[in-house]
Image (cartoon, rainbow, N blue to C red):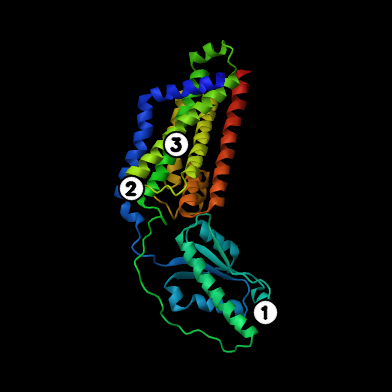
Amino acid sequence: MTILNIVYFTIVRNLRDRRTLMQMMALPVLMILILGTALNSQFTPATIGTSSVAFLNSDGKWASVSFEEFLHLEEIQELLEVQTVNSYDEGIELIEEGDITALLHIPEGYTTNLQQGKDANIEVVSGIQRGFRITIIENIVESYVNRGNVVQAGAMVGIKGLAYDSQNSLKENTISTEGNIPSSMDYYGITMLVMILMYGANYGLFGIAEDFFGTVGARIKSTPISGYEMYIGKTLGTVLTLFCQALIIVFFTKYVYGVNWGDNLMAIFGICLTLSFFTTGFGIMLCMLSPTRKFATNIINLVVPVFTFLAGGYAPLPNLGKVIGKARYLSPNYIGQRAFFSYIYEGATSNTMYFVLFLWGLSLLTMITAISVGRRQAA
């Protein structure tokens, strides 16, 4: 019961800190409203436009040349802006730098495999961040492959001269992007939630700091309560405090602002719980590693805005350059945001699971570090 009592009193203590509680609840709500309203036009595309892709032909024979000619058709050029690259690595580098959406690669032996009736694939290589443009590119490639399969099947049964007439059978209709790409409110609902959870590291910091730096810790050490019971109880109490605050923000933004949190709120709650554990561990680790509580607080107040900026939390940053583009993967905000975006808008549950497991790994690392440092200093 000791740990449960510590959890209870930690939650009560956090809730009694009304100033911090109001900041944690009011800041994201106001930021979502202000940024979501002011930048609404930047998240509502008027036209789809063209998608930039790179093309690499490692085969060079007639079948691959036919696909290359297909890419240069006028109808295709209205959808794709194609640039030729000299190597696979060059194409991957362009993806990482944000200059292209995908790399279209025809591997060596493509024509030979077609002639021998073996599998012959055209590779569509994209970054970890999938969007509706990837779907467009994949559909274009799939239409070419299906056309080729029909011609090949016709030749096998003796139909010669099978061809297609170029006709416009499309009817233009206005489409809605609602639910497919995030609106400004949707975008900032996610990024500001992640940001405020990162600021929640202060809860973990203050909870441990009063035992670590203050006189309260000396009195606690004279009681039968073990250090591990105190650590586990305060950690769980802080995690539950942050988790409950995250749920309130999710429900408020969903029903008041109309933020799209997807069809499965349980999955969203799971991501929120994961982030709550990470930020708590992050705050505790900083407390153990820092000479004073004030120093640790300053570190949190410095790195959270930097993490938020690198993750595109304040404004989307599609083209960051090679160095900064890779640096954002060091931002926990980016990992948390990608977990939400992948699940809600891309349906990529495998990617979501990857990001969630990565955050759990970071949580474990921070807590092990905190325990290790705490034991050395206690000794």
Query: For the residue labelled by badge 3, is the local secondary structure a helix, a strand or a loop?
Result: helix
- The CA span between labels 2 and 3 is 19 Å
Q: Position of residue 160 (x, y in %)?
A: 59, 89
N-term mark: 1 or 3: 1
- Say few, some or many: other residues with alpha carbon within 10 Å of mark 2 (under 14 / 14 to 19 / 20 or more): many
Query: Quick check: 314 above or below 101?
Result: above
Query: Quick check: 328 above or below 219?
Result: below
Under mark 2, the amino acid is Gly
**Circle 2/circle 3 CB separation < 8 Å:** no
Under mark 1, the amino acid is Gln
N-term mark: 2 or 3: 2
Under mark 3, the amino acid is Leu
- Say few, some or many: other residues with alpha carbon within 10 Å of mark 3 (under 14 / 14 to 19 / 20 or more): many
Query: Quick check: 190 above or below 373?
Result: below
Q: Position of residue 224 (x, y in %)?
A: 59, 12
- Say few, some or many: other residues with alpha carbon within 10 Å of mark 1 (under 14 / 14 to 19 / 20 or more): few
Q: Residue at x 48, y 55 (%)?
A: 346
Q: Position of residue 9 (x, y in %)?
A: 47, 20
Q: Quadrant of residue 367?
A: top right
Query: For the residue labelled by badge 2, is the local secondary structure a helix, a strand or a loop?
Result: helix
**Circle 1/circle 2 CB separation < 8 Å:** no
Instruction: Residue under label 2, please give it.
Output: 36
- The CA span between labels 1 and 3 is 57 Å
- The CA span between labels 1 and 2 is 55 Å
Instruction: Residue under label 1, please give it.
Output: 115
Residue 299 visible at all: no
Q: Residue at x 33, y 63 (%)?
A: 46
Residue 39 visible at all: yes
N-term mark: 1 or 2: 2
Q: Position of residue 223 (x, y in %)?
A: 56, 11
Instruction: Residue under label 3, please give it.
Output: 197
